[in-house]
Amino acid sequence: MERRYGYCCINLSLAKEKISTNRGMVKKTFLEKGIAYASELALKNVLDLRHILEWNDDNNIRMFRMSSDIFPWCSEYEISDLPDYQAILEILKSCGDFAKRTDQRITFHPSPYGVLASVNPSVVTKAIKELNQHGEIFDLMGLDRNLFYPINIHVNTTQPSKEEAAERFCLNFQRLSDSVKKRLVVEVDDKKSQYTSVDLFHLIYKPLGIPITFDYLHNRCNPSQYSEEEALALCLSTWPEKIPAITHYSDSKKLYEDESSKEVAHTDWVWGKVETYGLNFDIEFEVKMKDLALLKFLEENKKLLNYEREYTEL
């Protein structure tokens, strides 16, 4: 199975043509212009999503993280209440059909403000609505309810302890829609006080069975007792056999581009060797130069990628 490489949310190659799925507004504008304006922006966003998917296909890119801003301020309304809902629905379905026809893997990474394990009930309620809307968007696109189209989140709290926060996460998971439950994955954290791959394996995967997204930079900033290869293999073991795991890759900006940056800051470009240890999984590049960085990486690593392709076809 050929490895997929992807990028996140913004296509810089198309930005000069003002193609974007991130049209949004501040809350003051939403309060002034309301759902009609949100609908207008959402319609433009989904139209441009199709352009981006077509560009991906033309450039042999088989994975893309959709922007969570595709529906501006959707926490304040139901998607089905948008005045342009029928037109939006038709376009989203065409995007999903195109993604499936061209074998593009689509992912989501909702905002860190949605904390499913929060001690605050109102925060949990908002997080559930946000996650359910992400699942709804995938459903409207006609994408299968499985981990090939993952919705990736962090636990985002350790209060009052990792164990108690993880237990709340597992309880609140049961309140999510089936659409989300079948797609949800949790990601390794970058802060040393947060969740390592081993923490997530025992506290989230074991009780729920939901997979773990390995993040190279996060694991380097917040390592467990395992080596990188062992931690990666542990995370991969949580994914279904027939669905490749998603991983995230960025180098540390402090090491490669700006010594004054924090260690956890992502680079603009891909600088280091992406060590896969001979394992099969997909990689999303979380770097600031988006598709430009991915194209540069693919060009510079043609020999490696050809070898990977030949190896997986054996």
Image: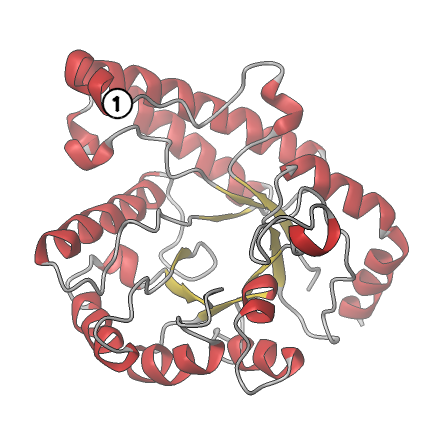
Residue at 16% from the left image edge and 32% from the top image edge: 76
**Is the residue 210 above or below the residue 83 in the image?**
below
191 or 41, nearer to the observer: 191
The answer to whether residue 275 is left or right of residue 49 is right
Q: Residue furthest right?
A: 303
Residue at 23% from the left image edge and 49% from the top image edge: 132
Q: How many marks?
A: 1
The N terminus, quarter of image: bottom right
Query: Dot 1 surroundings within 10 Å: few (below 14), some, or many (20 or more)?
Result: few
Rendering quarter of residue 314: bottom right
Residue at 32% from the left image edge and 24% from the top image edge: 88
Residue at 37% from the left image edge and 61% from the top image edge: 154
- Visible residue check, residue 83: no
Q: Position of residue 172 (x, y in %)?
A: 17, 66
**At numbered mark 1, what does the secondary structure look like: helix, strand or loop?**
helix
The answer to whether residue 26 is left or right of residue 213 is left
The answer to whether residue 177 is left or right of residue 224 is left
Q: Which residue is mark 1?
A: 86
- Visible residue check, residue 201: yes
Rendering quarter of residue 27: top left
Q: Position of residue 167 (x, y in %)?
A: 21, 78
**Is the residue 120 above or below the residue 130 in the image?**
below
